[in-house]
Amino acid sequence: MKSLVCTKPGELRYTDLPEPLLQSGQAIVRIRNICICGTDLHAFEGTQPFFDYPRILGHELSGELVEFDKAPGFRKGDDVTFLPYLNCGECIACRSGKTNCCVKLQVSGVHIDGGMAEYYSIPTHLLVQADGLSLTEMAMVEPFSIGAHGIRRAAIRPGEFVLVMGAGPIGMCALEFARLAGAELIVTDINLHRLDFCKHTLGVPHIIHAGAANMIERLMEITRGDMPAVVIDASGNRKAINQGLNYLAYGGRYILIGLQKEELIFSHPDFHKREATLMSSRNATREDFERVIQCIKNGMIHPLSFITDRVKFDEAAAGFPNWLNSSSHTIKAVVELD
Ligand SMILES: [Zn+2]
Ligand SMILES: [Zn+2]
């Protein structure tokens, strides 16, 4: 089968690999849509921490269920998506339902090979029914679930001001779920095109350029002196994350969806006087996937509005350098297989 292998940073190569064979407890999916994520782009760029090459990328996937061993409720030929987080089912996190942060977690396209191939094999318990969604919407369920999970952690109350730092697709997905939770939205990024997208397509009322020298004054003005009750980092930028605590209201919650590899440094008194809550938000769970699917079905979120680039599998390798280029105006690219 045709596969696209990231052989080393900056190099993607189409390679003919054997098709996966059906194994006990596994399902084989004929991949139809692959959405391209920041993780894929950073792996290609060579800036993704803890990444080994060669690696087949791709974890935002949908396709046709061709074969499976024990998958109650599923039929051959069903269009499906799945959780790309392979968990052990036995560790303390798994036992308490936090499969998203399993001690032995392996994420498709990160720790193990992903789905940029004609066929992909995954444990059947990760399959997700998404009847009624298009294949592209199904492939977009994963990134929306990341945003939904972060917002679920934040436990937003209607009317609270929520600042999202970073207007990449994950930040945008977080904004969408913060909106559904009744938040007053504020977004900051260095990319003006993305801020513009947030304003005009997502209807975010308050946008602030991340380079603005008067950031704190702007936030004071917007929140009428309170500052945001919730700050969400979706930038993964160390400077932004260290700075974010200064934007948080007293009694507020600070949620880190983005990840970087250095230590975080902020003032203990600044943290303490706020009685701030600091949380990380990792991946998502089945509950988040199901919530996202329901919201797409009900027309509460519109994943297709994020898709700016659509290419065939043959054109995917050539697409990567463009999608990485911040002046390319790409929000989300999708690769289609016949
Ligand atoms: Zn992703
Ligand atoms: Zn586990």
Image (tube, rainbow, N blue to C red):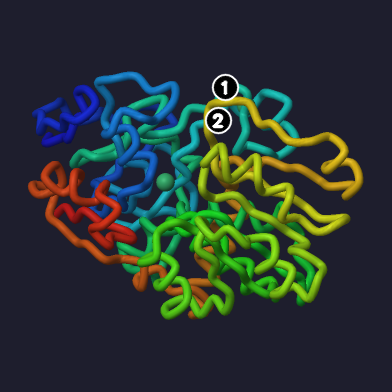
Residue highlighted by disc 1: 104
Which of the pair 62/67 is nearer the observer?
Answer: 62
Q: If the image is split into quadrants, where does the N terminus sit?
A: top left
Does residue 309 lie above or below 235 as drawn? below
Label annotation for residue 117: none
Q: Residue at x 62, y 33 (%)?
A: 101
Q: Quadrant of residue 305?
A: bottom left
Answer yes or no: disc 2 within 8 Å of ligand 2.
Answer: yes
Which of the pair 28/102 is nearer the observer?
Answer: 102
Q: Is residue 177 left or right of residue 119?
A: right
Calculate the distance from the C-alpha at mark 2 to the C-alpha at mark 1. Answer: 6 Å
Q: Measuring from the top left, give residue 112's x and y in whole percent.
A: 38, 25
Q: Measuring from the top left, give residue 120's x and y in whole percent.
A: 29, 37
Whether pointer 2 and pointer 1 mark residues with C-beta atoms closer than 8 Å, the reply is yes
Q: Residue furthest front?
A: 213
Q: Which secondary structure lies at badge 1?
A: loop
- Which callout, 2 or 1, points at the residue further toward the start of the chain? 2
Q: If the image is split into quadrants, where does the C terminus sit?
A: bottom left
Q: Quadrant of residue 197?
A: bottom left
Answer yes or no: disc 1 within 8 Å of ligand 2.
Answer: yes
Does residue 193 lie above or below 107 as drawn? below
Q: Residues within 10 Å of mark 1 (few under 14, many from 20)?
A: some
Number of numbered discs on residues: 2
Q: Amino acid at mark 2?
A: Asn
Q: Which secondary structure lies at badge 2?
A: loop
Residue highlighted by disc 2: 87
Q: Is residue 282 left or right of residue 49?
A: right
Q: Amino acid at mark 1?
A: Lys
Q: Measuring from the top left, give residue 110's x and y in whole percent.
A: 39, 30
Q: Measuring from the top left, give residue 195's x and y in whole percent.
A: 44, 68
Q: Residue at x 11, y 36 (%)?
A: 2
